[in-house]
């Protein structure tokens, strides 16, 4: 009677290739020494009830569990199986197999998830020319960078795209204002700080002065028509801003593979996008505009404005076609705040109707929440202005440095004086990054320096200390650890050792989930758990001077290098001494 049930077949299937990765989908058991508990028999038993069987003295789940276990072929990864009183199948992994796997992590690196490789375009950071990068761009930059690192490690071919706002009507007012106030702009290019002030000033004129507004419009028209002076001015404006973006990327360790392919890049493609959508009968005329309506949405996409110009919507249509059709990417990811959700819903729906998603291609809005100040409102400066990213980085760094200097004065710092500056930067920036990624990215959060730099909280600083402790054990041994990895063998005996090994090996599953969901929280959680397991190991298993010293050193080594890998995936610099 059991045979026809789909759950049963699934169980046989799982039994046949019962493996770490598969068992890991079961829940971790809190009943030692079992590592996993599988609730399949309990689920099956509830089906029995539906067939009119009553549990009574039969204890169906227990009997079923025992029966299922008896059907499973022998498996070298499993040391023991057992049925719990409630009918859970309790599985204990073989210490030897775990030890072998761990050893292989040391020699061959992390076991990567088996996936079909994809070509992925990731649009992230994407700040605007002549404006300061703000905290929203910070989120996009660090989340996007981390996602690219994970995808790349998993074997995907990744292209990092910086879709900077380098086109649009604002350049008209900038150029007009430039011609009035900076006649020698091209020879004497100002710094970007001046540029943002300059942006504000030109905006005020634009709002208040009709004649200026007209001139601004003429300058845009001239720019779009390819006027030489205006093109040179526009390029110079972009260059000043890009210099500032690059400085920030450098500080944050953002991959230099992030390339600017800004809005202006798509200008030449806009007419043919319009034409294609027109031919496919997707456009409507609306008060002189060409719009594309998506069922269920009140606002349409504006494909061409009434003055004949193109805007944000048209550019993103050209961008998605370029990425999926012209360049043939399988997956187009947009790391942009959730405020633009509607925009991307419409763009993706329109792309689908245009047939650009055919062949299993996907477009995803990897959206994130807003950063708030301690007043729970959008993060602002005291006078209500935009918080500049540089100031945030400076502030975090100076706080981390203060802390180090204080510890040093108390004789508690192990950081060399000459390394203090670099260490402070690592703590500050990794602190900001972890604080940001250690949560569901859709949630808004409150930006507090104190919380993100707290050494006792769930923070990067805590991770850094744990990692430094591992490094200090390794260096105190006085042994060449890399050489040891090829000569000594790991033997796992103590429960805490086995738990730690299991946690290290779990990274494979974590990566698989992250690649699919584009959430970085699982990596943060994994890093944190790794540290917690490590501290249990450290208090129960003596490493130095123990007869198992070599094996245990390798366990520490595997933990430390896994931490470095995990942290570097999140774009965090790791320090060895603290
Ligand atoms: N520059 C835009 C902003 O600052 C973000 C662009 C996001 N990417 C895109 N393809 N629309 O809001």
Image (spheres, rainbow, N blue to C red):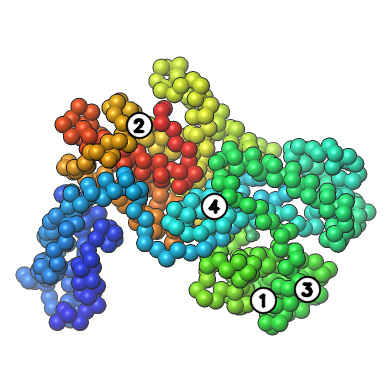
How packed is label 3: few (under 14 Cα within 10 Å), some, or many (20 or more)? Answer: some
Image position of 510 with respect to 480: above or below: below
In this rendering, the answer to whether 397 lies above or below 361 is above
Residue beneath label 1, please? Answer: 293
Question: Percent x, y for residue 312?
Answer: 71, 62
- N-terminal of the pair, mark 2 or mark 3, is 3
Q: Which residue is mark 3?
A: 289
Q: Whole-Å distance between the Cαs marked 1 and 4?
A: 30 Å
Q: Is residue 279 above or below residue 502?
A: below
In the rendered structure, the answer to whether residue 131 lies left or right of residue 88 reads right
> In the rendered image, which quarter contains the N terminus?
bottom left
- Residue 471 bears which disc, if any? 2
Return the mark for residue 144.
4
Real-space Cα distance between discs 1 and 2?
59 Å
Report the Cα–Cα distance between label 4 and label 3.
34 Å
Q: Nearer the viewer, mark 2 or mark 3?
A: 2
- In the image, 501: left or right of 62? right
């Amino acid at each position: 009677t059991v045979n026809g049930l789909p759950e049963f077949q699934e169980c046989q299937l799982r039994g046949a290739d019962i493996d770490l990765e598969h068992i890991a989908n079961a829940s971790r058991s809190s009943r030692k020494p079992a590592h996993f508990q599988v609730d399949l028999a309990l689920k099956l038993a509830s089906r029995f009830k539906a067939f009119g069987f009553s549990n009574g003295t039969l204890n169906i789940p227990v009997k079923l569990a025992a029966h299922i276990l008896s059907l499973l072929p022998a498996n070298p990864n499993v040391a023991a199986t057992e049925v719990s009183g409630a009918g859970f199948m309790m599985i204990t992994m073989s210490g030897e197999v775990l030890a072998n796997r761990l050893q292989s992590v040391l020699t061959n690196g992390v076991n990567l998830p088996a996936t079909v490789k994809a070509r992925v375009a990731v649009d992230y950071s994407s700040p605007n020319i002549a404006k300061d990068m703000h905290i929203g761009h910070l989120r996009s930059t660090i989340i996007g960078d981390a996602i690219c690192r994970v995808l790349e490690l998993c074997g995907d071919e990744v292209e990092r795209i910086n879709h900077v706002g380098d086109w649009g009507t604002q350049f008209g007012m900038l150029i007009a204002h430039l011609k009035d106030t900076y006649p020698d702009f091209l020879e004497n290019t100002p710094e970007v700080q001046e540029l943002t002030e300059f942006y504000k000033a030109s905006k005020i004129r634009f709002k208040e002065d009709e004649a200026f507004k007209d001139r601004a419009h003429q300058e845009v028209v001239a720019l779009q028509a390819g006027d030489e002076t205006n093109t040179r001015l526009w390029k110079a404006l972009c260059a000043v801003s890009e210099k500032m973006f690059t400085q920030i990327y450098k500080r944050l360790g953002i991959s230099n593979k992030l390339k600017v392919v800004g809005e202006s890049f798509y200008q030449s493609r806009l007419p043919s996008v319009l034409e294609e959508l027109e031919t496919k009968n997707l456009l409507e005329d609306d008060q002189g505009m060409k719009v594309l309506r998506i069922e269920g949405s009140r606002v349409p996409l504006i494909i061409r404005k009434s003055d004949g110009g193109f805007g944000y919507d048209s550019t993103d249509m050209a961008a998605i076609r370029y990425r999926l059709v012209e360049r043939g990417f399988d997956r187009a990811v947009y790391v942009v705040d959730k405020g633009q959700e509607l925009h991307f819903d419409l763009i993706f729906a329109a792309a689908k109707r245009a047939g650009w998603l055919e062949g299993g291609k996907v477009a995803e809005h990897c959206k994130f929440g807003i950063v708030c100040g301690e007043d729970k409102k959008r993060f602002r400066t005291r006078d209500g202005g935009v918080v500049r990213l540089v100031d945030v980085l400076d502030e975090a760094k100076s706080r981390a440095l203060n802390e180090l200097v204080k510890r040093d004065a108390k004789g508690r710092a192990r950081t060399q004086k000459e390394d203090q500056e670099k260490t402070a930067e690592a703590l500050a920036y990794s602190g900001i990054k972890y604080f940001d990624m250690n949560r569901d990215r859709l949630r808004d959060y409150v930006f507090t320096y104190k919380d993100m730099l707290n050494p006792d909280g769930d923070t990067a600083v805590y991770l850094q200390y744990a990692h430094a402790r591992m490094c200090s054990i390794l260096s105190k041994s006085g042994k060449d650890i890399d050489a040891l990895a090829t000569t000594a063998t790991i033997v796992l005996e103590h429960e805490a050792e086995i738990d730690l090994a299991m946690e290290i090996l779990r990274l494979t599953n974590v990566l698989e989930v992250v690649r699919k969901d584009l959430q970085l929280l699982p990596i943060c959680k994994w890093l944190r758990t790794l540290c917690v397991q490590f501290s249990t190991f450290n208090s129960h298993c003596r490493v130095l001077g123990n007869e198992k010293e070599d094996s245990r050193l390798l366990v520490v080594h595997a933990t430390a290098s896994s931490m470095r890998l995990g942290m570097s995936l999140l774009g965090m610099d790791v320090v060895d001494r603290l």
